[in-house]
Each structure stands twice: as C-alpha cells, then as structure tokens.
Amino acid sequence: MDDNLSGEEEDYYYSSDQESLNGIDNDESVSIPVSSRSNTVKVITKESLLAAQREDLRRVMELLSVKEHHARTLLIHYRWDVEKLFAVLVEKGKDSLFSGAGVTLLENQSCDSSVSGSSSMMSCDICVEDVPGYQLTRMDCGHSFCNNCWTGHFTVKINEGQSKRIICMAHKCNAICDEDVVRALVSKSQPDLAEKFDRFLLESYIEDNKMVKWCPSTPHCGNAIRVEDDELCEVECSCGLQFCFSCSSQAHSPCSCVMWELWRKKCFDESETVNWITVHTKPCPKCHKPVEKNGGCNLVTCLCRQSFCWLCGEATGRDHTWARISGHSCGRFQEDKEKQMERAKRDLKRYMHYHNRYKAHIDSSKLEAKLSNNISKKVSISEKRELQLKDFSWATNGLHRLFRSRRVLSYSYPFAFYMFGDELFKDEMSSEEREIKQNLFEDQQQQLEANVEKLSKFLEEPFDQFADDKVMQIRIQVINLSVAVDTLCENMYECIENDLLGSLQLGIHNITPYRSNGIERASDFYSSQNSKEAVGQSSDCGWTSRLDQALESGKSEDTSCSSGKRARIDESYRNSQTTLLDLNLPAEAIERK
Amino acid sequence: MIDFSRIQKELQDCERNQDSSGIRVCPKSDNLTRLTGTIPGPIGTPYEGGTFQIDITMPDGYPFEPPKMQFSTKVWHPNISSQSGAICLDILKDQWSPALTLKTALVSIQALLSAPEPKDPQDAVVAEQYMKNYQVFVSTARYWTETFAKKSSLEEKVKRLVEMGFGDAQVRSAIESSGGDENLALEKLCSA
Ligand SMILES: [Zn+2]
Ligand SMILES: [Zn+2]
Ligand SMILES: [Zn+2]
Ligand SMILES: [Zn+2]
Ligand SMILES: [Zn+2]
Ligand SMILES: [Zn+2]
Ligand SMILES: [Zn+2]
C-alpha cells in the first residue's frame, strides 16, 4: 500500500490520520481569536484619504464641539492619535489641551472673521498703512491685520513647508491660523500655492500619524496603510507589496528591524568583498594593486614584476629559498598580521555560512509562481479524473504553508547570524550561554528545515498521475507536514521570544509575531466605513459615553471599551472567516464544523 | 517683493523718536536693502562706553522673513561670533514675527549684550570662558570694547595711522574694513 512512502514513515509528526485530525481540532479553537484580533489593516488610497481623515476629525469635533480647523490643529499636534488627545483632555483639561496645540478660542468672539465696521479706516501694525475695516482679518486669537500682510505671511510659511503650523503674525502669539482663512486669502492671488497648502494638510494624516504609513512600493502605488492596534506587524498593500510596518522595508520576521537593517547593509555593502580581498590578496608595495597568492612560498611577484614578501608585504629581491627570502627578515609583524587575517577569514566564513542558507531559501521562494502554476495544473487534471478523492484543496493549502514557512526559515538565518554573533549581543551572554542557546535554536531550525523540504518534495510528486490510494497517501503526508511545519514555526518564534531575546532585556529587538495565515492583507478603507455604518450610531455613542465616564471618574483606561471598535473587528472577521481557517485543515475538518 | 514703504516708515519712526536708548538705523545704500544699525553698549556691562555697529541685510520677504543682522564691530560675547560677528538670537531666526521691527530687533540685541545666554552659545570659546572664568571674560570683553568699539579710540587710531603718512579717507576705510583692528588696517594699508 505504501511502497513509495514507507521509508520515511517514522519521521512524521503525526503517524495516523486520526491523530492528526485531533491535533487540528485542538488547533482550531485557538487559531480563531488569534487571527481575528488583528484583521484591521486598511488601505488608504488617494480617494479615501479625505474620508479616512474626516473620520478622526469628526470624532474630535463632536467630542469637543469645535470647528474643523481646530480639530485638525489638535490632531496634527497630537499626531492623529485620538486616544492620546483624549488622555490629555482627561488629565489636564480642555484649556491646557488647546493652548498646548496653539488653539485659541476667544469667549466673546464675533462670528465674522472680517473686522466689523467695514469701511471705517483702521491701521495695520505690519505694513503700517491705514486700510478700510473690511480689508482686515481677525484670527481666533483676536489679532487682526490687513489681508495683504496675512497673504504675505502665509506665502512665506507655506513655501517654508510650515503649512501644518502657521502661527499668528503677532509677536509671541502662538495661535495657529484658521485654515479656511489661509485658503481663502492665498487662493485669491496664488491658486497653486493654495493647492499645495491643501495637499500638505491632507498628507499630514499620513506623515504625522504613527498608525499610518505610505506603502513603500516603487514606483509608488499611491496608497497608504493604516493599522489599528499594533505597529509591530507585517502587511500587504492592495498593490501586492508585503512590508514590515515598523521599518517600511520588506517583510523580515523573525528578524528584528535592527537586525534586518544590518543584514541588508552587510549583503549590499562592498564590505564583504573588501574582506575577501584582505584575506586573499595583498597590495603590491610598488604599484599598490592587489596581488593574489597562488600557493607555494611566501615570495610573490606582481604583474609589474615587483617581488614582495607575502607575510609582511615588504618589497624584496627575487632570491629566495622556500623558507626565507635573502636579505629580508620579517619583523614581529608577522604574527599579528597572521592573526588578523585568521580573524577576517573566520568572520567571512561565518557570514558565508548564514548567507548561503538564507539565499537558498529566498531563491526557492522566488520559484513560487512556477510551483504555484504547476500545482494548479496538477489539481485541475486530478479533478477531471475518476477518483474517489474529489477535493484537492489540501494541495493548494500545502503550497501556501510551504511558501509561508520558507519565508520564516530564510529570515531565521540572518536572525541567527546576529543572535549568536559578536555584533549585537557580545556582552549580553557568556559564551557558554550562547552555545546552549545556539544549540537550542538550531535544533528547531533544522527540524523546520527538514520538514519544509519534505513538504516541498511531496508537493512536487506527480500526484495527478497516481492511483487513488497513492494520492490518498500523498494527501495525508502533505496535511501532516503542513501542520507540523506550522507548529514548528510557532515553536521557533516562542523559542526566540522566551529563550533567546526574553532574557536579554534589550527593547530594540521586537520581532513581529508569527502569523500562521501569512501576512495580513490590508482591506479597502471604504469597506470599514460600510461595516461601521451597519453598526450605526452606537459607535459614536460608545465614544462619547466613554468620555463622560472618564471625565467623571478621572480615569481614561478601560472603562467601557469603545463598542464601535469591537463591532468593526467582528465584522471584518466575518468577512474573512473562510480564508482564516483553510490553511491547515483538510476539507472535511472544515465541513464538520 | 521687499516692502520698501514699511522700511521707509520704520526709518522715519526711528528719526522722529530719537530716544534715550541711542539706537539708530541708517541706510547704507540707496535701495534700502543694506542698512547699518548702531547700539550703545549697555551701562553696567563690559560693553559700556562702546558703540557697536551692526550690518543689516533685508531679505526679499521682509517683514515676513527676519532681517539678517551681524556685528561689524568686533565684540567678545558668548552669543556673538568673535570671528564673524554672527548673532545667535531666536527672534532673528524662528521666533521672528512680522510685527517686530528693525528697532525692536536692535533693542533685543542690546538686551542680549546685557544678558548673555552661555548655554546656547554662538562662540564656544567665549562661552566656556564666561562659565569657567568669569573675571577673565569680563576683562577680555572690556578690552575688546576699548579697542574696537570706542569712538575716541577710532579717532586716535586714525590719527596714529595718518601720522604714519597715509591719507585720512584711506585710513578710515581700511579701519572700517578691518572691523576696527588697527594692526590689520595697517597691514592693508601697507599692502595696498
Ligand atoms: Zn498690513
Ligand atoms: Zn494672534
Ligand atoms: Zn502599495
Ligand atoms: Zn522591520
Ligand atoms: Zn606591482
Ligand atoms: Zn618560490
Ligand atoms: Zn616579510
């Protein structure tokens, strides 16, 4: 029955079908809440930017009953962090919140921003001219100057790139100018500049907001990505680019951002080739070109015919025996140089070791498209055959699992390079400690690697040409290996978190957590709007009642959690429910639910 | 784009209100883009008795951009470069407001002479001396005032150099272009 597969049977994690399904059942109950928790990543396109921004503006306007431009000034000051703004309000009160951000509200303010009394002449303190009252504009802070002067001031400030914080012209007045006034006055004489001003304000939502980032695609797709709770995550933009939200470079978990940055530099840098040259060549003392030694004695000769001593690099004559060059004696330099060279050699070798493995997995995952094609071909052929087995989703699921775990595996090599190298944690671990940790980690890494390769091998089998029982065999292997690989990935992350980094107390190395289902795909911002609409008023009510409670109790945290937020998460979870579960599970397991 | 009429009005205003402060602004050229400010050294400071000249250049965006000011008289002060005369003062940078004027800026500079801010230095050497060896600082600043910022001493310098056989106008321009440094002026006169 299992002639083709029997040899490897004992290596599998789940030896019988029944056992594996039990394992999956247990898994299932855990994986639902974990996956649904973070499905809140949104794509913000040029079109939805305004709507996304308006959502926050409206919240603040309602919360504090202020005009839009005041809400924007506050939000820019607090980097679009509504929670933070809310906390300052509760902690320090409205006055301090406003004055800190440069919002000034006069109690007895006339509604009209033009100074009333229209045509009577008034003096402007800036240009020292008398102008009719209707040509003067008063800001919310109460200072009024003539429109020409305001326009001159706005022009300079917008051109200086200060659109987001144009302060009043009066000395020591820190009030932020009303954006409507700025827009109205500037557009009269310079419509282009007014447009620039609007763009700056709009893009502030992305640039000053720690929960929103531009997609780093080149050429730029025009999108930004918004996350809800945690900046430490990897996301996929609607343009298809996957990236690390924290550092905006390609997704690199389980490397930390710091490690990845170092690794990237190391790989692209010439430094390693420079290292190679120092190990394998010496500069000629006459023409200074690098000369390679090709075995033999320590006398080398450059293309320029100059001979020199390989050990110390000093120019010599040509007369020599194997052991010494006549008329030349190397000083005690020799030993230092040799040691230095040994060290460089060892460093290079170590780097090559990790880099080769990293590269091998990256290269394999580059063949994803091809393999993907191959699998779907085999699946469609199999589906047309007269077999007992009709469902081939296990093959595509296995394929996704393979891709996912290969990524983890490849980035685990640069992680290990830094984790167990001298560069980052030299003083944090004794060498014994390091050895124990390295063994622990490498055991896991090797197990994962072995299983990934096995999974890959089974997926490459021409199962579209096999008989029923053999296809069934492959199916079980693929399912078992998928589950095993997933578990191994999870274990490896746990090991990193608890056993490796956990004891080091170095906050800078945060690892994006393992996501069994792969990198989260950002959904369109508008869809979140829609689902919010379905929740209706309750979201706003939740927000305001939370404020009231907080104001009463004086505490901002965890009173009645914003019902709107929770409802929205549930909604998006429902939408993506099917894609959340199918990766590990055989079709029956899903059907049985 | 410079608002010349405002500069004109500022100058008239200065003329009209010749107050006790002794601060003056005079145009250096006809087009009002270069001016010279004069401030007397504040009483009770090592700068007392000196008269300090400040070069003023008006930027295109004046009064929405700050005027560029720098000492042409050599002065020993933590916030003023002893080499170039550059001034470290917030209202001449990001704290400028169009509501300020040349006169108010010069008043602020005068106030800076009375109250140095060694924690935000322009000249690190002077600032260090100010903080570590205040007495030496005071005497150096006084010596610089005596040497470079005293009217009478200017006349004395002119007199000495004229006695050496140089023309009066020549001597005056040499002293001015050397920032009041008599030896430098002599060098210039000799090499001319
Ligand atoms: Zn005006
Ligand atoms: Zn104001
Ligand atoms: Zn994109
Ligand atoms: Zn990163
Ligand atoms: Zn050579
Ligand atoms: Zn030989
Ligand atoms: Zn030698």
Image: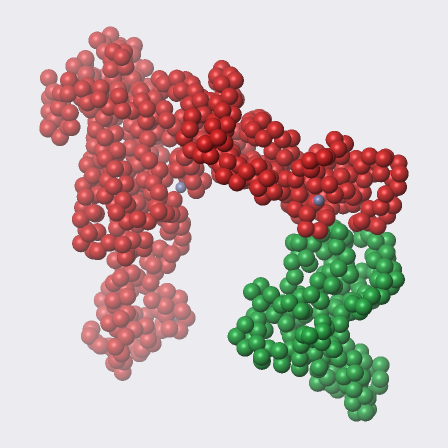
Residue at far bottom of view: B164
A184 displayed left or right of A75: right
Residue A251 against residue B67 in the figure, above or below: above
For ligand 4, the image quadrant comes to top left
- The quarter of the picture where residue A280 lies is bottom left
**How many numbered circles are shown?**
0
Residue under the point 37% across and 47% down:
A508
- Residue B123 percent across, percent down from the top left: 60, 70
- The quarter of the picture where residue A270 lies is bottom left
- Residue A332 percent across, percent down from the top left: 25, 77
Q: Of residues A383 and A480, which is closer to you in this image?
A: A480
Q: Of residues A238 and A75, which is closer to you in this image?
A: A75
Residue at far front of view: A552
Chain painted green: B
Residue under the point 61% across and 38% down:
A73
Residue A231 against residue A41 in the figure, above or below: below
- Whether residue B147 is visible: yes
Q: Of residues A219 and A428, which is closer to you in this image?
A: A428
* Hue used for the chain lettered A: red
